[in-house]
Amino acid sequence: MTPPTLLILAAGMGSRYGGLKQLDVMGPMGETMLDFAVQDAISAGFAKIVFVIRRDFEADFHEHISSRYDAQIDLQFAYQSLEDLPTGFTPPPGRSKPWGTAQAIYAARNVIAEPFAVINADDFYGKESYEILATQLATAKGSDLAISMVGYQLIKTLSPHGSVNRGVCQIHGDKLKSVEEYTNISSNAAGVIIGKNLQGTQEVLRSETIVSMNCWGFTPAIFSAIQSHFIAFLKKSGSEMKSECYIPTVVDELIRSGAAECRIMQTSSPWFGVTYPEDKAHVVASLKELSESGQYA
């Protein structure tokens, strides 16, 4: 049985945060969010970690990550770039924005050949989430298109400092029925949560709605599925300056077509993240509390 790999999406530009939040100190002992993720992954039994980064981050990541964890776990890097596209496609002149989370995962296609989990570098998912994913992936066969997801309640994932994007889920039992990326989600003065669907229509969302925080479990078969979806996306939206190909949209298409099922797994672990500079104080306080409780030494 092959131990799973953890794929960490760390190529974000941090435009709303105002800097490279992936390597910003958040923990009481000088830890970054990545340090907590790596510790939790090692504890849960992951055998390899792959970071998806940009080339201009490479030196900083090697200095911070490789020096700490090379002796503890197999570390590898993949690179998200504007030019990493399927054969026959090129980015439009003037575009500088990468192509979104689906392309970020696609960037790791040549370094992962085993079941793997996916997380965001700037989110805290909690020990239990890694344990749940490691257990689920241990039974997955690499040749099958198997998908799983750790879900969180929407109300627990909002920022009081601005809008966020979330994959809004419809579930039945422990199966995901559909997932759609919603943008500009926020709670208004009356406490009503509003977000925009992919068609740009505003909708009211329920606080207890389960959302995707990009905490996924996949088998390597997902890479060919992403490529097929990515090609269709590029044909339709590849000439746009800011269009993004989202992994929830890929998963939703696979579910609706009957090509795959996705198991939803819920956790009691807290989630928190840093989208805006003002979010940092809450994250720092939360990590301090967890460390003082003995969860992190």
Image (cartoon, rainbow, N blue to C red):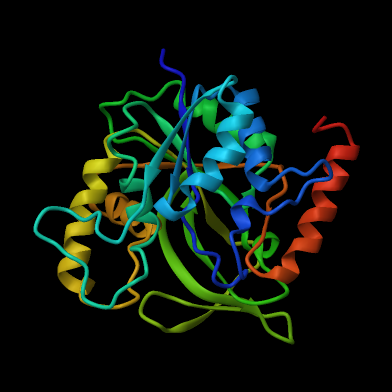
Q: Looking at the image, which residue is at 28% across and 56% down? A: 253
Of 279 and 198, nearer the camera is 279
Of 127 and 242, nearer the camera is 242
* Residue 141 rendering spot, x and y as whole percentages: 33, 23
Viewer can see residue 258: no
Q: Quadrant of the C terminus?
A: top right
In the picture as drawn, the residue positioned furthest to the left comes out as 88
In the picture as drawn, the residue positioned furthest to the bottom comes out as 189
Q: Quadrant of the N terminus?
A: top left
Q: Looking at the image, which residue is at 56% across and 49% down? A: 121
* Residue 61 rendering spot, x and y as whole percentages: 54, 44
Q: Is residue 185 above or below residue 40?
A: below
* Residue 280 rendering spot, x and y as whole percentages: 75, 62
Corner quadrant of residue 18:
bottom right
Left or right: residue 147 compared with residue 46 = left
Of 11 and 164, nearer the camera is 11
Q: Looking at the image, which residue is at 60% across and 65% down? A: 19
Viewer can see residue 252: yes
* Residue 69 rendering spot, x and y as whole percentages: 60, 27
In the picture as drawn, the residue positioned furthest to the top comes out as 1
Left or right: residue 113 compared with residue 35 = left
Please count the marks in the image: 0
Left or right: residue 63 compared with residue 118 = right
Q: Is residue 37 above or below residue 92?
A: above
Q: Looking at the image, which residue is at 84% across and 45% down? A: 28
